[in-house]
Every structure is written in C-alpha cells, then in structure tokens.
Amino acid sequence: MQQEAQQVVVIGGGVVGLASAWWLLEAGYRVTLLEQAPTVGSAASARNGGQLSYRYVSPLADAGVPLKALQWMFQEDGPLRFRPEADMRQWRWLAQFLANCNSADNARTTAKLLELGELSRQSMAQLELKLPLSEFSWRDAGKLVVYRSKSAFDKAVAKPGSEDNRVVLNGAETAKLEPALAELAPSLAGGIFNSGEAVADCQAFCLALEKRLMAHPRFEGVVHAEAHTIFAENGRVSAIQTNAGWLAADHFVLAAGIQSRNLAATAGIYLPMYPLKGYSLTAPIGAEHCAPEISVTDFERKTLYARIGGNLRIAAMVDMVGEDTSIDRRRIAGLTKLARATMPHAADYDKAEPWAGLRPATPNSAPIIGATKYPNLWLNVGHGPLGFTFACGTANLLATLMRGKQTPFTLDCLALAA
C-alpha cells in the first residue's frame, strides 16, 4: 500500500513562498499555501526591480560601506535613509551588519551567492518548461552596470569575473551598447556587461505560478488568512494559529518575507532580518521613447532600470525605517528627478506609478534556508533585494533538504546560525 504524501503548510504567498510550494509539490508533498493578502505576490514581490541578476550578487556589507553609508545619509537624494527605532532588533541587525563589513566576509558570501545564483538560473530554466515566458514578460536582456567614478570602475574591473559572460566597456562603448545612456555617456567612466541575466514581471510570475499550483493534483489550495502564532509541543510544531483558525500539518515552511521575523519569534526563534524599504517607479513607454533594452544598474546611484513589457521599471533606495510601507513623496520625487537626468527620453515619467516595499535583508545579504530547532519547521527567508533572482534556487534547495537529500553545494552562510 502506497504511503500517503506528507502535508506541508507554506506560509507566505510571495515569489519565494510560491516557488517553495511548487518545488515541494514536485518533490511529492501535499501543499497548502497560507497568504494574508487577497492576492498572491502583492507585497515585496509586487513592483520590485524585476531583474534576475544571477551573477551580480555582491553583498551590501563590504569594507568601506559604513563610511559611504554616513555620506549617503547626508545627501538630499542619497540612496540611504535611517530612522533610529526603540527596537533592539534594529540595533542588533546593525551590529551584525557592521561585523560583516570586511573584504574577507564579503568574498566568502559572494562566492556562496554565485553558487546559489547559478542553481537559481538552472531552476528557473527548469520551471520555464511548464510556465510560458510570455505570461510574465521574461526577456534575456543581459545586465549592464555603469560607473561614473573611475576608482569604482577600476575596482569592479579588478574583481574576478566570468570572462565568458563579462564585457568591459569604456564610457563611449557603454552608450553605444545601450543608446538610452547616450546623454549620460560623458559622465561615465565605463560599464560592465554580463550576458545571461534577465528581466521579468515578478508579480505576473507569481500569478502565473499560482495558476500552475491550482492545477497540481497535490495542491490543497490557498488559505487567505494572517498567521499569528506557531504552536509547538513535544519538540515539534503541530499547528499555526491564524485569524481564520488553526492549520495543522506534518511540516511548516516560513517564507513570508519580513513577517517571518515576528512569526518565528512566537516559537522562540530569532531571525536576523531587517526590512530595507525600497521604492520603484513604473513608467509607460511610448513609441516616441528610447527605453533601455538592456537591464541597467547605475552603480553609484544604486538605481536600476529595466524594461518590463510596455513599462520602464526604476527601482532604488534603502530606507531603514522599520515596517513602514507608506510612500514617502520626497523619495519618489528624488527618484523621478534622478531618472529624468539619467535617461530623459526613456519613458513618460509624468505618468509613472510609485510603489514601496520591504525587502527582508540579513546582515550578510545571504538568504536563510533549511532547518530550525524544530525538525518540521523550515525556513526560506531573508532574500533582501534578490528574492526574484534566488526564489527558484532556494525553493529547490529547500525541497532537497526536506527530503533528506544532499544539496549540490554546502550551505555555510545560507543556514540559520545556531
């Protein structure tokens, strides 16, 4: 007699939770998805940058970053805003972040994230066999990182990279490759182009994946309710309390972005995450506009530009202001001003729609995947700005770990510290 498949409740209906649900279904589990919003992919997955940057995975924590951060905070339209909170989690995160701001830790984390990035690229390609690319505006656009400062450009060029995919360009060559940068060319020290990177609509991806989940024979549906408490007894988690009642299962997966932090705390688990608030603009592209075909990252301004369908997505900024999702009009005005100066003819900025979301970041920029002190409570959290990039790879790893199989590489900094 065939043993009945084990039941899993995946908490979180963003891109990471949906990908986790899919890989667990394919691994043979029965899956229920718990999402508090009426629609999946409506929080941090909604209007993020849309870049799938498998090779550009440099952690935020690095040597020299604390000094740069201080400078950014005093710039009117700088990429960083900081508001002190009476919350020890903010200060604990900052202390851990500062401890990671050195070249050695940055190099170790980068190497691991590159391994994860390659697995994520392969996993996305595997999923694309069942999920038509046209449903989420996927394009193999490549990624162009542009540098205004010669010192920053020289440092980036000196870093090891995949010469098969990386092309180093001077300012004029950069603008020739991407004509949308023509007016910025005189200010550019150079650019680095990486092929094999993509752009897509993350929210559309979430909705397309939900349709496939609904059609899967082992999927048991989406419960739209807010999770409140993890209930554990005899060393195992037995149920999740929600505002719609209790959910019981054999296994539970936390993949609810920054909300995972509070939920894990109800089970006595500290997740070293902090919400880094980011902003985006989605501006329509008309026939008269010269929008970038390549995904562009302005290194010094910490701003990215991606053509997604008929729109230009501009995403930037890090606000450390707690779990505040409101849109700061001054930040949006600053982002619009920067976009107009950088690519003045790329889109209709007068009709741009603003958005803000919370990116669940760890101090070392590495997501946390795998086991907790409870053998049936699992984590897939802390992806920061790379949730879309890493979602399929971390879901693949999660399913591998839950089945007791060997992962393709050691997790190291990707596991929850004891």
Image (spheres, helix red, strand yellow):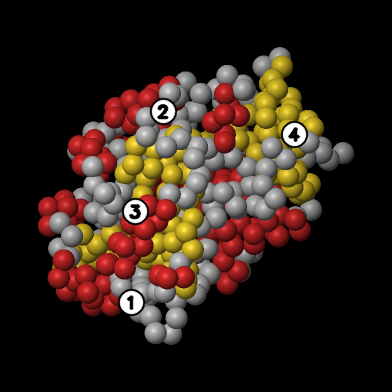
- Mark 3 and mark 2: span between their CA atoms? 32 Å
Q: Which residue is mark 3?
A: 56
The percent position of residue 123, horizontal first and vertical second, equals 53, 54
**Foreground mark, 4 or 3?**
4
**Foreground mark, 4 or 2?**
2
- Mark 1 and mark 2: span between their CA atoms? 40 Å
- Mark 4 and mark 3: span between their CA atoms? 40 Å
Q: Nearer the viewer, residue 295 or 251?
A: 295
Callout 3 amino acid: Tyr
**Residue 221, visible in the rendered structure:** yes
Looking at the image, which residue is at 44% across and 76% down?
285
Name the side, left or right, on which 81 lies relative to 4. left
Q: Which residue is mark 1?
A: 345
Counting residues from the N terminus, which is met first, the one under dot 4 or under dot 1? 4
Q: Which residue is mark 4?
A: 243
Q: Which residue is mark 2?
A: 85
> Mark 2: few, some, or many residues within 10 Å (few <14, many ≥20)?
few
Circle 3 SS class: loop
Looking at the image, which residue is at 52% across and 49% down?
44
Give the position of the N terminus as an image quadrant: top right
Vertical placement of residue 75 versus 229, above or below: below
Counting residues from the N terminus, which is met first, the one under dot 1 or under dot 2? 2
Name the side, left or right, on which 342 lies relative to 215. left
Looking at the image, which residue is at 31% across and 62% down?
337
Counting residues from the N terminus, which is met first, the one under dot 4 or under dot 2? 2
The percent position of residue 286, horizontal first and vertical second, equals 45, 81
Counting residues from the N terminus, which is met first, the one under dot 3 or under dot 2? 3
**Foreground mark, 1 or 3?**
1
